[in-house]
Image (tube, helix red, strand yellow):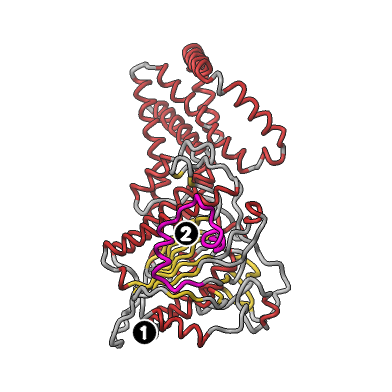
Amino acid sequence: MNKVRKDNFRTFLAVFSLVNLFFIPEWVNFFGEGPNNTVFMTPNPLENAYLALGSVVFGVSLLLFVLIRLFYKFKLTFLESSIFLGLLLCLFVPLNFLRECSALFNYYPELSYKSHWLAQNFIKPLKIPLVFVFAFGFYKLVRHRGEQISNWIKILGLIFSPVIVITHVNLVKLYRENRIYFNSRNIGSKNDHLSKRPPKVIWIIFDEMDYRLVFEQRPPKIKLPEIDRFRKEVVFFEKAYPPSDFTVASIPSLFLGERINVSSVEATDLVFLEPGTNKEMKWTQAPHLGKETKKLGYSTSVIGWYHQYCKSFHHELDYCRTFPAGRFDYGTNFGSSVKAILERSFVIDKRLERAFIFNLSEIHASALEQIKGGLSDVLFLHYSVPHKPYLYDQTKKAISPHVERTPENYFGNLILVDQILGDITKSLQAAKKWNETVLIISADHSWRKSEEYDGKRDFRVPFMIKMADGKAINYTKPIPNLITKEIILEIMKGNLNSSTELVSWLDRHNKVFPKGTVLTPIEEENHHSLGRETIHDFDPKG
């Protein structure tokens, strides 16, 4: 009896170990990166994802173990050995992932050329005969060496069993570290003393959206009907400039309403010198939008990619979802996270593109859910498009991970922007909130690679504000979109209620241009120089 139990334990441990190795891409995805610039690739999953990942690994292991023992009991040794050999072959998925992580083809491009030559000239033309050869070889191995192969694979699994401890201990550790973040959902109290409640505000930042190529020099074949329609109802800025050319500094500047230069990155925070002093300050300590709206008694929700919004600002936010720059995120509940993990378990190519597609879908679904379920007073959305990788196939008119990385495909991502704006517009109208909502559209920076497309670079970004009255006004004076935070606070205070009032307020408050924009060095704005190199935006490589 003891011998049977020991054999069962060794078999389960070996299977658990091999399954755990198979899910190494998911473990790496989940744990993300260390507290440095690559922290932007660290997922910010909701609480359910921790249980989902552990359950998937254990559940698949238990299922395979039960099958193996059943086949053993009924002397179906061929099927038992097939499971073990299949597990071994499945390890090519994590091996390929590790090959991608090590950038092997980047360091040894001749290997890449040879592998592509092999795929194009041998594997693809002969794929049907190769499948038969592979199946025949699999059958012969299991038929004649099945028991021996199973024993070898069990030994391999037992050798790597310590990896189980590493992954699961880290899972529990990460969960415990994030419990404060999970449990912090402070709902801001409403400000009842106002005689008239201000409208809701939705502030949308589309990453790397270019003013010139959206409005002035858009290719004739590119149709953006939702953006064109929206323009007819807004205060439209012809000369709006972002605070930085990189997301890492631009978004914090917009949140603070003051241009800053990031000096270092921590696990859940950014460090910069306080404007006007030599004092080092953290983003979470500064008077950002979430803090200011909470002081006024209003609620704020944030959904976006790249920055660690949720862990950084969970005390000031009523709802938050953050998505990493180069990793998959997870679903909003246990079932959807399990489904996501299983669906991408055999992803072996275009992993970066597939991650961006999944995360963009989740960002958009979360945004629409917030609109449908009842808006916070301020909803901030940071979408990853039209930033690369390019995801929209203009020929097939569908999202695809196989879009070529040519400059022309930037416009495919602009079509996605147009569709997103259309969905938000329709959702607001369906909820009868369109005329009660201020909608602000802008970007953190323009298209940095536009010179690869037509040899030109324009730093201007779209900046459109639809006030509740929907009156269209063109604003031709140069302006930094850095002023958005102040505009939102004035709306929440009940001081800005129409397009005309907004324009009058801008004329009174518009500072000497181009202060607060990417065009002027911070040193020339009487801000103290950091004396360090600015950390640049994450530029995902596939």
Pointer 1 local density, CA inside 10 Å: few below 14, some 14–19, many at least 20: some
Are circles 2 and 1 on residues that touch, CB within 8 Å?
A: no
x then y, percent, for residue 318: 37, 70
Residue annotated with mark 2: 383
Distance between the Cα atoms at labels 2 and 1? 28 Å
Q: In this view, does 40 lie above or below 8?
A: below
Mark 2, secondary structure of its residue: strand
Residue 83 or residue 420, whichever sits in front: 420
Q: Mark 1 belongs to which amino acid?
A: Gly
Q: Residue, x 58% and y 35% (percent of image)? A: 95
Say which mark, if any, is on residue 494. Answer: 1
In which quadrant of the rendered image does the C terminus lie? top right
The answer to whether residue 232 of the structure is visible from this angle is yes
Residue 106: image quadrant is: top right
Q: Is residue 346 magenta?
A: no
Crowd rating for badge 2 (residues with CA inside 10 Å; few <14, some 14–19, many 20+): many
Residue that appears at 34% across and 76% down: 469
Q: Is mark 1 on a helix, strand or loop?
A: loop
Q: Which amino acid does label 2 sit on?
A: Tyr
Q: Residue furthest front?
A: 220
Whole-percent x, y for residue 343 in the image: 41, 39
Q: Please state the horizontal and vertical placement of residue 262, each as a whole percent of the image.
A: 63, 70
Task: Mark 2 or mark 1: name the one nearer the start of the chain.
Answer: 2
Is there any visible trace of residue 300 in the rendered image? no
Q: What stretch is highlighted in magenta?
A: 209-237
